[in-house]
Amino acid sequence: MKNQDNIKLDGIIAAIVDQMGEVDLYHLNKLTYLFEFLFIKNFGKRYTGELFIKLPHGPVITNYKKVFERLFQAGILETDLEKLKEQRKLSDDYHVKIELKKTEKTTSIIRLDKMIMDFIKKIIIKYGYLSVSDLEKEVYKTKPVKEYQSKVENGFKQQTGSYVLRDCIKLSEYKNTITLGRKLALEHLNKYPDIITKQYQTYEEEFSSLKKLRPAWEN
């Protein structure tokens, strides 16, 4: 992953933790995955570039322990570092509860436009407070995970350890369904990430309410 993608991924992780105050390891991995997938679904583009490794209970951030440890060392997250670094069976993160909490510095690395923050808030409202088992069910409804499972059943993928958002999703399937308003707003956001202009404000209604965004919220 490129350094710029690392910065984006860190910002999304920090924003989720900041909004929730504290979030367990399982939910943070899955909410980050849902953000990336639903961003693709709504805008036809990648945001963080993260590919997500498939484990027994769904996708997780690649090398997530190192990612969270790095954010811990930077003072962005608070967690039980020793517990986080413990060697566990692949399926154990489903059962082992490790909390990641916001600190005074969490907000300092969040450089997100209002459109992205509103999108994250919508995801947290819908999925952030589900039980572990219910969240797993929602994740397994998403097309990339269903596609991964299909490839496993047909012998083209291993049960775990391969990427979910690489060959299990095609951006071309989503690009043609994106509304013109979203395309224009995203182009403007990419071109002027730190500037809110009158032009951008003309698009804000569609994005700030998120009423027209997928999901509405079908997977």
Image: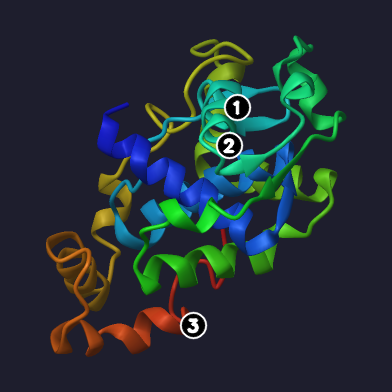
Q: Secondary structure at mark 1?
A: helix
- Cα distance between the residues tagged 3 and 1: 31 Å
Callouts 1 and 2 close, C-beta under 8 Å: yes
**Of marks 3 and 1, which one's residue comes earlier in the chain?**
1
What's the amino acid at mark 2? Lys
Q: Which is more foreground, mark 3 or mark 1?
A: 3
Quarter of the view holding residue 192: bottom left
Query: Residue 195 at what x, y percent from top left?
Result: 19, 73
Query: Residue 66 at what x, y percent from top left?
Result: 55, 21
Q: Secondary structure at mark 2?
A: helix
- Cα distance between the residues tagged 2 and 3: 26 Å
Callouts 3 and 1 close, C-beta under 8 Å: no
Q: Which is more foreground, mark 2 or mark 3?
A: 3
- Please name the residue that numbered disc 3 is placed on: 211
Colour approach in the figure: rainbow
**Residue 21 numbered tag:** none
- Cα distance between the residues tagged 1 and 2: 5 Å
Query: Residue 124 at what x, y percent from top left?
Result: 64, 62
Q: Secondary structure at mark 3?
A: loop
- Please name the residue that numbered disc 1 is placed on: 149
Residue 110 visible in image: yes
Q: Is residue 50 left or right of residue 69?
A: left
Callouts 2 and 3 close, C-beta under 8 Å: no
Give the residue at x 36% y 35%: 6
State how many labels appear.
Answer: 3
- Please name the residue that numbered disc 2 is placed on: 146
Q: Is residue 30 left or right of residue 195?
A: right
